[in-house]
């Protein structure tokens, strides 16, 4: 165990770790494989014990990589749409895209900010924002604000969890990552519940508006809007 701790601390102090992390955070913005929060949290916990990696450089690397990845997804959505690749055509992915399009239309600023905290949800939102022609300058600044808070949140979680184990950096990293995953699941479900609650309010308003306008006919609600045959009022589970 002591050998593993030394290896971990040695790797964290190497200069090559920052370019590797930059690429990892960049890819996470448009093709999430492993949520990048885990890297920030784990390395923040390690930094608490050994001083490496430098938290300021880690935070700047995560911020630049995350913003670049999000904007790459936006550009890909604008250039290639939402059906070019096979994985995009999967029913669950199309359902996520449809939900993101509905939410962007209703409350774009709120969605772009909150989606940064939902690993796979942020990818869908970034692609759809580009595909639907959401104003790029607005997207850029909303995403920048979301990424800044996301980086600070992730580092804070790592520092908090890393304090529980003082003499074993490897165990501290493991606890920090596990804590981040559990908290991430809680945040994910809380945000999804909140968006569902807002959608129900929208549907109630649309129904009431339709009942008050018998001449022009009922107003189309979210259940009647679809992309690729998917009900937009229901986020992907």
Image (spheres, helix red, strand yellow):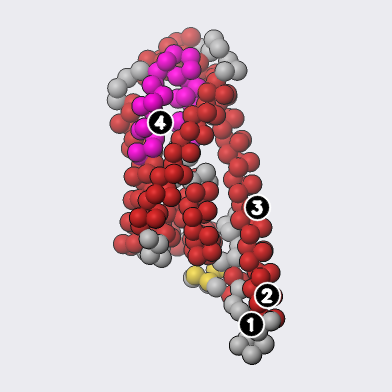
Q: Is residue 83 visible?
A: no
Residues at discs 1 and 2 in contact (Cβ within 8 Å): yes
- Left or right: where 197 falls relative to 131: right
Pointer 3 or 4: first along the chain:
4
**Disc with the residue nearer the chain's start (3 vs 2):** 3
Q: Secondary structure at mark 2?
A: helix
SS state under label 3: helix
Residue position for label 3: 193
Q: From the image, tell me which residue sits under label 1.
A: 218
Q: Residue at x 52, y 44 (%)?
A: 117
Disc sitting over residue 59 in the figure: 4
At x 37%, y 15%, the residue is 10
Among numbered discs 1 and 3, the one appearing first in the sequence: 3
Q: Earlier along the polypeptide chain: callout 4 or callout 1?
A: 4
Q: Which residues are magenta?
A: 37-65
The answer to whether residue 188 of the structure is visible from this angle is yes
Q: Residue at x 41, y 24 (%)?
A: 55
* Residue 104 image point, x, y percent: 49, 61
Which residue is at the front of the view, 211 or 21? 211
User: Does the stretch in magenta take in 52?
Assistant: yes
In the rendered image, residue 32, in percent from the top left (x then y), is placed at: 44, 45
Q: Is residue 214 above or below residue 190?
A: below
Q: Which residue is mark 2?
A: 207
């Amino acid at each position: 165990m002591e050998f593993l701790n030394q290896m971990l601390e040695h790797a964290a102090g190497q200069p090559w770790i920052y370019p590797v992390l930059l690429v990892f955070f960049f890819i996470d913005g448009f093709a999430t494989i492993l949520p990048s929060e885990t890297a920030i949290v784990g390395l923040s916990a390690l930094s608490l014990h050994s001083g490496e990696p430098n938290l300021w450089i880690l935070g700047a690397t995560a911020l630049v990589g995350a913003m670049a990845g999000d904007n790459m997804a936006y550009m890909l959505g604008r250039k290639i749409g939402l059906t070019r690749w096979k994985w995009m055509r999967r029913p669950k992915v199309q359902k996520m895209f449809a939900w993101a399009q509905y939410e962007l239309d209703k409350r774009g600023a709120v969605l772009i900010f909150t989606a940064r905290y939902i690993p796979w949800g942020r990818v869908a939102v970034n692609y759809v924002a580009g595909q639907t022609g959401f104003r790029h300058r607005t997207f850029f600044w909303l995403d920048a604000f979301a990424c800044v808070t996301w980086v600070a949140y992730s580092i804070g979680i790592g520092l908090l969890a890393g304090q529980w184990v003082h003499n074993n950096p490897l165990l501290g990293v493991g606890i920090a990552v596990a804590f981040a995953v559990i908290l991430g699941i809680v945040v994910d479900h809380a945000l999804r519940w909140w968006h569902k609650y807002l959608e129900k309010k929208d549907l109630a308003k649309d129904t009431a508006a339709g009942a008050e306008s018998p001449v022009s006919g009922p107003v189309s609600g979210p259940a009647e809007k679809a992309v690729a045959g998917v009900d937009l009022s229901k986020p992907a589970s």
